Image (cartoon, rainbow, N blue to C red):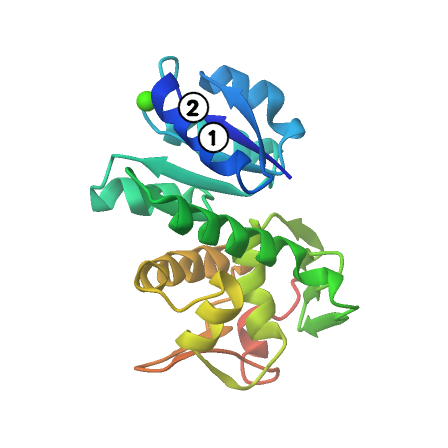
Amino acid sequence: MRVMLVEDDDGVADALADGLRGFAIRTLRARRADDLLRDHVLADLVLLDLGLPDLDGLDALRKLRRVSNVPVIVLTARNDERSVVRGLRLGADDYLLKPVGLNVLLARIEAVRRRVRTNVNGPRGVVRIGDIRIDLDARQVVVGGTAAAFTPTEFEILASLAGRVGQAVSRELIMDEVWGDAYLAASRSLDVHIAAVRAKLNRPGLISTIRGFGFRLEEPPACATDYSPRS
Ligand code: CA
């Protein structure tokens, strides 16, 4: 796999590249947001610093998400909650603080990759709920006849719920399926991503919160009145 290091600090980038090389992970270097936006198609995954010389990393992420669903892990010293939440809302799949240990970084890369690869485990089929069509194999969601763009993480959360329509699904199970581990940071990420999934489905009541437990994707007709087709 090829990981693009978007990092203007050569010392940091060299250390990351050396560490990843030991695990047979090739790296591409990008020192500026412009390089990322030009070369992202060459990468299987992007590690994104936020303090870049030409454009703030969060703005670069927003631009990237208009054209690509490549997995992105933000890797930054910026640890204020607002930046973390913004990064996740803009479509980062994970958010790590510098300095990060190599083993933690590898585990997060592997977890993100596992999410993206989930559909190699055989066909999972199509789930239809009212006017929403979720193709679990093609990783496509159509809402009211219009394709909706989900990031890999958002899609996996939706897929986790769609595989169990009408059942309450625990936060722990979703986090385990999506992140590969119910680690603490994922808990906040889950809420941010659930909010994004709800916004993109645009069907109030379709995903219920089960307080103290998790979430449930409702079956029609319980929520059908909320999204009857427009005529
Ligand atoms: Ca920087």
Q: Is residue 196 above or below residue 157?
A: above
Nearest the eye: 53 or 17: 17
**Outermost left residue:** 80
Residue 133 visible to the viewer: yes
Residue 9 visible to the viewer: no
Which residue corresponds to the image point at 20% horizontal and 42% vertical from the top-left?
80
Q: Which residue is mark 2?
A: 14
**Where in the figure is residue 55, as x and y percent of width and height?**
38, 18
Nearest the eye: 143 or 211: 211
Q: Which residue is mark 1?
A: 18
- Disc sitting over residue 217 in the figure: none
**Where in the figure is residue 176, as x and y percent of width and height?**
47, 70
Q: Is residue 205 above or below residue 8?
A: below
Query: Circles 1 and 2: CB distance less than 8 Å?
Result: yes
Q: Is residue 209 above or below residue 70?
A: below
Which residue corresponds to the image point at 35% horizontal and 20% vertical from the top-left?
11
Q: Is residue 178 above or below residue 164?
A: above
Hey, which quadrant is residue 43 in on the image?
A: top right
Q: Quadrant of ligand 1?
A: top left
Confirm if mark 1 falls within 8 A of ligand 1.
Answer: no
Question: Secondary structure under badge 1?
Answer: helix
Hey, which quadrant is residue 98 in on the image?
A: top left
Nearest the eye: 174 or 231: 174
Question: Secondary structure under badge 2?
Answer: helix
Q: Quadrant of the N terminus?
A: top right
**Where in the figure is residue 10, as x and y percent of width and height?**
38, 17
Which residue corresponds to the image point at 49% horizontal and 59% vertical from the top-left?
197
**Where in the figure is residue 184, as x and y percent of width and height?**
30, 64
What amino acid type should be assigned to the residue bearing mark 1? Asp
Q: Residues within 10 Å of mark 2 (few under 14, many from 20)?
A: some
